Image (cartoon, grey):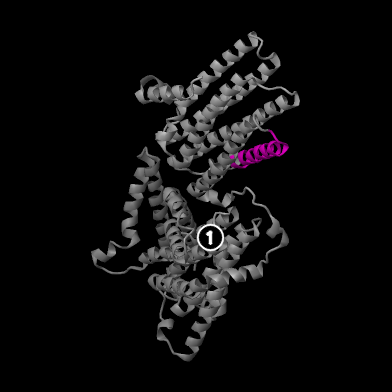
Amino acid sequence: MEIWDILEFIGGLCLFLFGMNLMGAYLEKAAGSGLKNILGKLTGGKLAGFLTGLGVTAIIQSSSATTVMVVGFVNSGLLTLSQAINVIIGANVGTTVTAWILSLTGISSGAWYIQILKPSSFTPILALIGIVLYMMAKSNKKRDIGVILLGFSVLMFGMDTMSSAVSMLKSDPGFANILTMFKNPLLGVLAGTILTAIIQSSSASVGILQALSSTGAISIGMSIPIIMGQHIGTCATALISSVGTSRNARRASVVHLAFNVIGTVVFLTCFCVAKMIFNIALLESAASPLAIAICHSAFSILAMALMLPCSKLLEKLSYKLIPVTEEEKTASKELVIDERLMTTPAIALERCRAFTTEMADISVGSLVDSMNTLSVLTDEAAKDIRRKEGTVDKYEDVLGSYLVKLNTYQLSDADTRESAMLLHMIGDLERISDHSVNILESAEELRDKNMSFSAEAQRELGIIMSAVKEILDLSLEAYKTGDILVAERVEPLEEVIDDLKDALRSHHIERMQAGNCSIEVGFIWSDLLTNLERVSDHCSNIAGCIIETAHHSMSLHEYLSEVKADRKDYADMYKEYSEKYAV
């Protein structure tokens, strides 16, 4: 093999790996919303988890990516270990799809209807479509499809280049001598493991094996142990990604390794015994890309059939290898959003949304609790409100940093809007919790200075607080359900609360002028009204974000101007709330 052949092989390998990574990344991006929907099925039983792992891996063309994603899910608390095991087993079967696609390079026939199935026949057409979409399409979705087609074309071109570079090796005695080493099954397993661990993709290493099979010097019997080793080597990515994660996430990566090691030990033993007892001529025949794809799928399916019913034993084994510590037993739930989820932005955003929902519940609950302290104030209630405010601050820090970093990844238009909405929302929710502390401090000042509001002031305060509680409920419901009709009820109520604040401030000035209220109490009254009115402003922002996201727009002021000027239903809702909260 000359130096030029080696360089040609290296160039083909680089194109192959680049095309595979490019296609996989953009398939993940394009399938983002679909993967988000799949999340709802992850909590199902064995079959649902298995099919989820199979489907996701078939879509994104990488069991390593799926397994790393699963490790991130477990680390973030999105999946339990038992659920993750079923997904990992499914991923091992789903990764065989790539080998079947690559096996098309081995098609050989003079018939045109067979030749058209060869990648070298249709890849140039896909590349042409891809470059046209990428360079001329205005829609990001169409551009992404263009990149997927280009990635596939580069992948297949790299595969053809590798096959062409090694085709001369069939008559090379040095290459034949090297291959005789792999007649030893253990060396075959070791070679497959090392190669796959280095390039961190079983699909890619299987593709290299399929390219080498074009020499005709690799037998089916030699390729089977190598394929088994490739399944072990693909675990390297998940093991590396589990460094620094929770012990449960590390158990998920250990399960992935155990699944493939046990499957390899069992079936390699069966393979060696069968080879010694029976003279199987098929094993000595030359392997083709199709034969390798069949062996790859057969091993994955047999391993799945062996291990899926034993998933509980795999879970027990992982706990034996990584025992539960005392710290783990007593550890409190922490806010963790694993950065591994960023490789699939739709799923990362779904996790952010779940945490934002928790943040919203805490923030709104804290505000309601603070309003209650104006009638009954206890030290325990005050401590709880301040604790909740600190928790909300932590949520804002973690979610804000995560979302900002997520925006550096390639996001679809829908994911970009979702990310922007969440960034706006967490800021408003954090400010609402700040206002809860401000209201608490007003209650504490009234108590410490032994002051109180007049009966009329208390009645009016009850009215505006009822309006604020309703706008909080509406905003929270609109966010959780995505109901635009509920969100549209927030703005007219917010305007009513603005009017209430002005009216109540004027009434209190009148009471002070009449000598029914002190100036010092008036300052506290003014602070309370300001805080309550600003809470309604933040609710309006939240509802506005929900409406903007639904309408694919980020112009809140334009929307508010439109509804206030032209919408009759807005005027009707404003009238309804004005009558409901009249003073």
Magenta residues? 377-399
Q: Is residue 437 magenta?
A: no
Residue 430 in view (yes/no):
no
Q: Is residue 480 left or right of residue 321?
A: left
Q: Secondary structure at mark 1?
A: helix
Picture coordinates of residue 330, whole percent (x, y): 70, 57
- In percent of width and height, residue 371 lies at 61, 31
326 or 229, which lies in front? Answer: 326
The amino acid pointed to by label 1 is Thr
Q: What residue is shown with label 1? A: 67
The foreground one among 280 and 58 is 58
Q: Residues within 10 Å of mark 1 (few under 14, many from 20)?
A: many
**Residue at left offset 53%, top offset 56%:** 69
Outermost residue toward the bottom in this view: 277
Q: Is residue 171 left or right of 399 when viewed as pictured?
A: left
Image x and y of residue 260, in percent: 54, 71
Relative height, residue 327 to residue 146 (above, below) = below
Q: Characterize the magenta stretch by its predominant secondary structure.
A: helix
Q: Is residue 379 magenta?
A: yes
